[in-house]
Every structure is written in C-alpha cells, then in structure tokens.
Amino acid sequence: MKPAKFAMFASSVAYTIIAIQVSCKPAPADSAAPSAAAQTSTPAPQPATQASPPASHPAPQAAAVAVKIDNFTFQPKELEVAVGTTVTWTNVDDVPHTATSKDDPQTFDSGALDTDEKFSFTFTKPGKYPYYCKVHPHMTGVITVK
C-alpha cells in the first residue's frame, strides 16, 4: 500500500472510530436544565435498559456507519447496527466494485462504484444482510441489524 493511500486509510479508520465513539456516548448532564419547579408533572420517557451484548458480538452502531471498499475487501467485513442505521459504502480502490445484497429479491444494489464513489442504504428491518461485489464475488460482507 502506498504511503499516501495508507495515510488516507488510517485517517478514515480513525475518523470512523471517533465518530462511533462520540455518537455512542451519553449526553452530558446539562447544568442549565430548568429547575424541578419549572418542569411539567409528566416525567420524560427513559430509554430502556439493555444488558450488554457478549464480548464476542460487536455493539450496535450509530445511525450512520461507513464501509470502505479497498484492496478488494469490505472494511469492516461484518457490522452490527441498529434499525434505522444508514450504511455508506465508499470505493477507494482503483477498480469498480458493487455492494449487492445476496437476498432474493435483492434488498440493495449499489451498481458499479468507480473510485471515490459512494452508495448509501438505510436498514429499516432487523435481520442479517449478507452482501458481495458482483464484479469480484469473493468479496463479501454481512450487516446484522438489531
């Protein structure tokens, strides 16, 4: 991998990790919140508490997730996301690729993506969505929506 391409890859990975970490952090307590006397009598709904998934399973991702197509691979190859998440594939390889679901009928198909082109799809239903590149069928990935 060329140094410039590696630097671009490394910074993209770092950006994605930071974006995921930032979006998964709880909002800080607001010191300027209204006093209890100024609040209405109806309590705000609280999010449901869930047990943490086992360490072998990745945690669901934020509402926007990036998959890089580079060196004839999808990076990351496997993702676990929440319903409503938009996944964007970006081809940074020097040859065309696709992101095409293996479902019948197909759930999504990017068509040929040239270098630096993107394709986005929003997952609205839970399930496993295996996908591949039509041009290079050995390239595969899986999106798990919970």
Image (cartoon, helix red, strand yellow):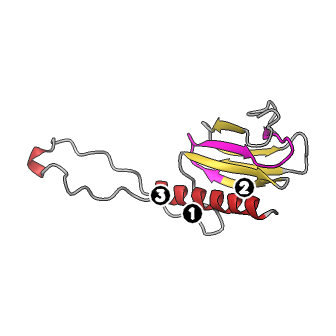
Residue 53, disc: 1
- Looking at marks 2 and 3 on the same chain, the residue that comes earlier in the sequence is marked by 3
Q: Is residue 73 left or right of 118 when viewed as pictured? A: right
* Residue shown at the point (75%, 56%) measured from the top left: 77
Looking at the image, is 28 positioned above or below residue 145?
below
Report the front residue among 138 and 47.
138
Q: Is residue 101 left or right of 52 when viewed as pictured? A: right
- Looking at marks 3 and 1 on the same chain, the residue that comes earlier in the sequence is marked by 3
In the image, what residue type sits under mark 3? Val
Residue underneath mark 2: 78
Residue underneath mark 3: 22
Identify the magenta region: 80-100
The answer to whether one can see residue 146 in this image is no
The CA span between labels 3 and 1 is 19 Å
In the image, what residue type sits under mark 2? Glu
Mark 2 lies on a secondary structure that is: strand
Report the front residue among 95 and 87.
95
- Looking at marks 1 and 2 on the same chain, the residue that comes earlier in the sequence is marked by 1
As for residue 137 lying within the magenta part, the answer is: no
Looking at the image, is 103 positioned above or below residue 81?
above
Q: Is residue 13 left or right of 41 when viewed as pictured? A: right
Q: Nearer the viewer, mark 2 or mark 3?
A: 3
Q: Measuring from the top left, give residue 110's x and y in whole percent.
A: 76, 34
Q: Measuring from the top left, give residue 137's x and y in whole percent.
A: 91, 46
* Residue shown at the point (57%, 53%) measured from the top left: 61
Q: Measuring from the top left, give residue 28's x and y in whole percent.
A: 32, 59
* Residue shown at the point (60%, 36%) measured from the top left: 124
As for residue 95 lying within the magenta part, the answer is: yes
Q: Nearer the viewer, mark 1 or mark 2?
A: 2
